[in-house]
Amino acid sequence: MLFNSLAFALFLPIVFGIYWQLGKHSKGLQRQNLFLLGASYFFYAWWDARFLALIIISSLADYLLARQMERQNSKAERKPLLWLSLSINLGLLGFFKYFNFFIESFVGAFAQIGVHVESPMLNILLPVGISFYTFQTLSYTIDVYRGKMEAARDPVAFFAYVGFFPQLVAGPIEKARDLLPQFSVPRKFSYPLAVSGLRLILYGIIKKVVISDRLAEYVNLVYAPESTFEGLDVLLGILFFAFQIYCDFSGYSDIAIGTARLFGFQLSINFRTPFFSQSVSELWRRWHITLNAWFRDYVYQPLGGRSGSKIRTYINVLIVFLVSGFWHGAAWTYIVWGAICALFYTLEALLGLGGKTYTGLQRWLFTLYTFGTFAFGMVFFRAPSVEVAWEKLGSLSSIFIQEITLFSHSGTELSQFLSPAQAGIYLSFLLLLFLIFEFKIGLESLDAVLDKWPRPARWLFYYGLIALLLIFGAYGIPQQFIYFQF
């Protein structure tokens, strides 16, 4: 069930109404948790009911293993149970997400030396959200193993934590010690929290439907197999994809956080206006924050973090980015993307550029540099193969002799009611307004900005966003969020 679908627009208010009615009873908390669990499983089964078996297996295994861990007296006794948890969860993730990738890679490697091997490819469907809920439940067993939290007693609360529908399929990835306790505390309806949630939902939908999905039309043209675009058109496609993926994913996160607030839960902020970062290291501290925190706590620090030599630290950084790239997708493009991110991160550290704060012109120059490195690295993230990514970058050589023809293409919805010049002006103006507003809320927060406005101005803003959504939103078949494929 997509957040930007009619089904979700019907699902959310129904679940919201029943949920708060259940909270009025003497056993309201237990009833609310059980209802949330059922609603979350219904939400997830909307894609494919068969996927429910995997999330139930993962939840049940980690619930039982963590309980057993807590009964052990030492880490040595708990370690086999942790390894069993890792094996079950990563085994499921590895089979469903990476089996065919490894088979293809081995077959390709043998082909390079002239050995033909039959490829036992399987028609495997990737369960939606498996990368996200696997990391979320693993954080629980690892923290119980480390003694950082107690094992959950209430199975309903734990299963609801793993399957909580607002953030089930694409995060934020919540550590158990942050989210799980919220299922044990009685929740009362909060009007300010609900208003805050609705604001985030509206803003997230605008980012997805009005900005991301509109940009996607042009990005898809540039990266289409039959594409002949070069020069400035490819440059526009590269820049547009940077904004597309940010508005798509941060829009999803806003909707997820806002939806959780409607039910009395606080989720972690996942993006902090990363495009205003002044270094690559700062950008990755402000982009997909919960995933980067997961890798920091459960991969980078166990590898030694910064405690060793500089070379060892850079190797640790490289490992984390490579694993992060591979987590995003079973393709060499994501691994190369991770390596490029590690390269820029390391170069900054060697040159002493990371961690500095600049002012005036320097600030904006370093902001442009940071955005540029991100956008060009994302060519490998978006391209269907490494070869295509290099082709797109190579086509930029004609940037000074090629005119912009992208907006003249008839294969977009905007081209049906706007001229090429009007489409270009509209998208440029839309992105400019978006950046100005993002800069403002980056200094404070969405609530802090809007709460300072007089009530008439706030309502004018809400109605303006709704009008923008109705007039310029991309409709038809709802477009899936990009991170659902991971």
Image (cartoon, grey):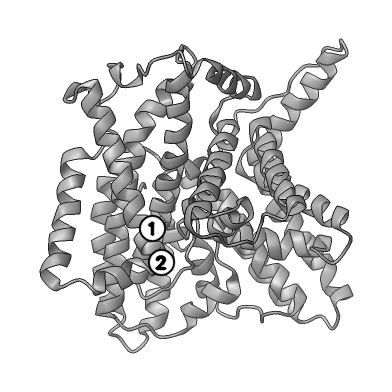
Q: Nearer the viewer, residue 363 or 312?
A: 363
Q: Quadrant of residue 337?
A: top right
For label 1, the crowd category at 10 Å Cα-Cα, with few meaning under 14, some 14 to 19 and many 20 or more, is: some
- Amino acid carrying label 2: it is Leu
- Residue 99 in view, yes or no: yes
Q: Is residue 419 left or right of residue 96?
A: left
Q: What is the number of the mark on residue 193?
A: none
Q: Is residue 141 left or right of residue 22?
A: right
Discs 1, 2 touching: Cβ within 8 Å: yes
Q: Is residue 126 left or right of residue 67?
A: left
What distance separates the C-alpha of mark 1 from that of mark 2?
Answer: 7 Å
- Residue 262 in view, yes or no: no
| SS assignment at label 2 | helix
Q: What is the number of the mark on residue 443?
A: 2
Q: Residue at x 53, y 38 (%)?
A: 375
Residue 462: x %, y % from top left: 18, 59
Q: Residue at x 77, y 16 (%)?
A: 118
Q: Nearer the viewer, residue 122 or 292?
A: 292
Residue 1: x %, y % from top left: 37, 47
Instruction: Indicate whether 267 appears above or below 44.
Output: below
Q: Quadrant of the C terminus?
A: top right
- Amino acid carrying label 1: it is Phe
The residue singled out by tag 1 in the image is 439
Q: Is residue 433 left or right of residue 145?
A: left
Which residue, as the protein is rendered here, is positioned at the far left?
456
| SS assignment at label 1 | helix
For label 2, the crowd category at 10 Å Cα-Cα, with few meaning under 14, some 14 to 19 and many 20 or more, is: few
Residue 182: x %, y % from top left: 48, 79
Q: Nearer the viewer, residue 342 or 162?
A: 342
Q: Residue at x 51, y 50 (%)?
A: 367
Residue 263: x %, y % from top left: 34, 72
